[in-house]
Amino acid sequence: MTGELLTPQELATELGIKLSTIYHWTHIGYIPVVRVGRLLRFRRSSLAGWLNKLETPGRRRKLSQSDI
């Protein structure tokens, strides 16, 4: 088996979000999940790729004359 598997509770804690959000995201197919029977597990390596796809650059602000 490749990659560490996280439980829904571990993932919620790591991301700093509610456990119910993890279950909702899993239900709608928003987050990659491994189903082991009835158990949900999340592969750390898959989550890294998923998070990289979500990352966006910060918005640049216009420079004023005083900033130059």
Image (cartoon, rainbow, N blue to C red):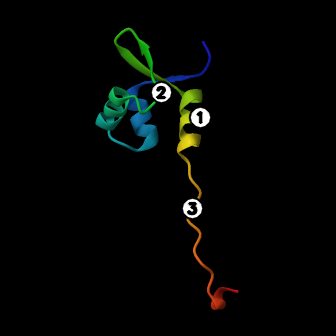
What x and y, as percent, mark residue 51?
54, 40
Residue 49: mark: 1
Q: Residue at x 63, y 81 (%)?
A: 63
The residue at which mark 2 appears reads as: 32
Dot 3 amino acid type: Gly
Q: Is residue 6 left or right of residue 20?
A: right
Pointer 2 with pointer 1, Cβ within 8 A:
yes
Q: CA distance from mark 2 to mark 1?
A: 10 Å
Q: Residue at x 47, y 27 (%)?
A: 32
- Which numbered disc flags the more N-terminal residue, 3 or 2? 2
15 over 67 or under it: above or below:
above
Q: CA distance from mark 1 to mark 3?
A: 19 Å
Say what secondary structure mark 3 lies in. Answer: loop
What x and y, as percent, mark residue 60?
59, 69
Q: Residue at x 53, y 32 (%)?
A: 47
Q: CA distance from mark 3 to mark 2?
A: 25 Å
Q: Residue furthest bottom?
A: 66
Say what secondary structure mark 1 lies in. Answer: helix
- Which numbered disc flags the more N-terminal residue, 1 or 3? 1
Quadrant position of residue 12:
top left
The residue at which mark 3 appears reads as: 58
Say what secondary structure mark 2 lies in. Answer: loop
